Amino acid sequence: MKLTPRRRPEGDQPPSRGPIAAYAGILDGRHLWLTLEHDEPVALRDPGSGTAYPLESVTDLLALLPADEATYDVVVGEGRRAQSVWTPPLDSPDPIRIPVSPDGLTRFSLLRSEQGSLRVHRAPAPPTALLEAIELRGPDVHLTLRPPGGVRQGDHLLLLDTDDQVLDVLPVTAHSGHVEALIGAGDLPAGYFGIVRFALGTEAEWVTIRRGRSDLADPHRAVLLPELHDQDGDEDRPRARFRWNPDSLLVVRVLDPDELDHPPATVTPLAGGRP
């Protein structure tokens, strides 16, 4: 039987001629780093209007592009001579992801067409409050937040379940454009176990709370956050643990006492394995 080698998809084969991206990345949510072995002008081109926005080796996309949501082709050359830039596949697993822009209002992403051409997409990000500091103060946790549009009268810290239903409302204090809140184990919803989401605002209108540098695919595993303990409880038995969810939003996991009563996990070595 004759075996025929499997043909790679057309877009996965680099062109024999034409510009190829040696590197493309948006590392800080606003600047595009692009490396090409090419001497002609490089630009982002709006496929609808044909408008071209010139690029440098490092370009501030927030300053360069219109604020509207749009997708742009990365091209080399001008007019009819412009050629799309080819890039290797972008879907390889990576612990680093493109963060939201520093102002929290824009999210850029790198895309790849079926033919392998490189594109830049700009989209609005939903407003979020920025967590500026989190620290233990005695048995409680102190949060310092920066609202997206400035401090508003009537704002509170909201505790939400996973369906965004309000579980409780906690007071906050405001000064100098910041909001502060204090959370103790006694402020957690009675009888509720699992993930509690935090939000800032009112029951009618609120925003979630994000991490300042949301550039990790799994931020929880790389960040140490405080725990809450009952004042008269065992120090080794936390009532709840703060954490970042996969979207880099602040949540707290309220622990079920029955889970804590289970014996600790053990590891059984494989036969012949080293101790």
Image (cartoon, rainbow, N blue to C red):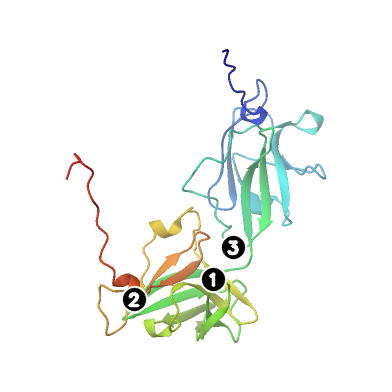
Q: Which residue is mark 1?
A: 162
Q: Secondary structure at mark 1?
A: loop
Displayed quadrant of residue 88: top right
**Image-quadrant location for residue 243:** bottom left
Where's residue 119, x and y in %?
67, 41
In the displayed structure, 154 sits above or below 197; it is: below
Q: Residue at x 58, y 48 (%)?
A: 31
x, y percent for residue 55: 66, 41
Location of the C terminus by quadrant is: top left
Image location of residue 110, percent across then percent down: 62, 44
Farthest front residue? 1
- Residue 156: x %, y % from top left: 54, 83
Spatial CA span between label 1 and label 3: 26 Å
The residue carrying mark 2 is 257
- Residue at 42 percent of width and 60 percent of height: 220
Q: Are marks 1 and 2 in contact (CB under 8 Å)?
A: no
Quarter of the figure with the N terminus: top right
- The residue shown at (81%, 45%) is 48
* SS at circle 2: helix
Name which residue type carries label 3. Asp
| Total numbered labels placed on residues in the image | 3
Query: SS of the residue at dot 3?
Result: loop
Looking at marks 1 and 2 on the same chain, the residue that comes earlier in the sequence is marked by 1
The residue singled out by tag 3 in the image is 103
